[in-house]
Amino acid sequence: MNGYGLFVWSSFAFTLTNFFGLYVIINRQLIKENKKFELKFNQLEKNKYTEAYKQRTNQVLVSSNAAQKI
């Protein structure tokens, strides 16, 4: 690589490490927010629960673990 190999590979390793770190942080935040949502959603009264469950977004979030789809 004409003497630039050290710079290229160290930049690649730095970028890969940072992206992996961001992925871990965002995944943890998503799991935490999903747990908060489930707690609030499960505390709804029966009539509000049925109305909220009719919405497509709530069905997806409650029925499956959104963090595992990433």
Image: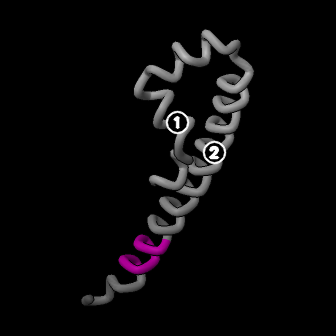
Comparing 4 with 64, the one in front is 64
Locate residue 50 relative to residue 10 in the image: left or right.
right
- Which label sits in the foreground, 1 or 2? 1
The x, y position of residue 60, in whole percent, is 46, 36
Rounded to the nearest angstrom, the CA distance separating label 1 from label 2 is: 11 Å
Does the magenta segment cover residue 52? no
Is 58 above or below relative to 22? above
Image quadrant in which you'd find residue 21: bottom right
Residue that label 1 marks = 61
- Amino acid type, label 1: Leu
Q: Residue at x 64, y 35 (%)?
A: 33
Picture disc at residue 41? none
> In x, y percent, where is residue 16?
46, 68
Give the main secondary structure, helix, strand or loop, of the magenta stretch.
Answer: helix
Please identify the residue farthest to the bottom as the structure is shown.
Answer: 2
Left or right? Give the position of 22 relative to 57. right
User: In the picture, residue 56 is in which quadrant?
Assistant: top left
Q: In the image, what residue occupies the spot 42% across and 71% down?
A: 11
Q: Quadrant of the N terminus?
A: bottom left
Query: Residue at 74% of width from left, 21% of height from top?
Result: 43
> Residue 51, image x and y in percent?
52, 13
Q: Which residues are magenta?
A: 7-13
The amino acid on which the numbered mark 2 sits, given as a three-letter code, is Ile
**Neighbours of disc 2 within 10 Å: few (<14), some (14-19), many (20+):** some
Q: Which mark is residue 31?
A: 2
- Image quarter (top left, top right, bottom left or bottom right) of the C terminus: bottom left
Q: Residue furthest left?
A: 2
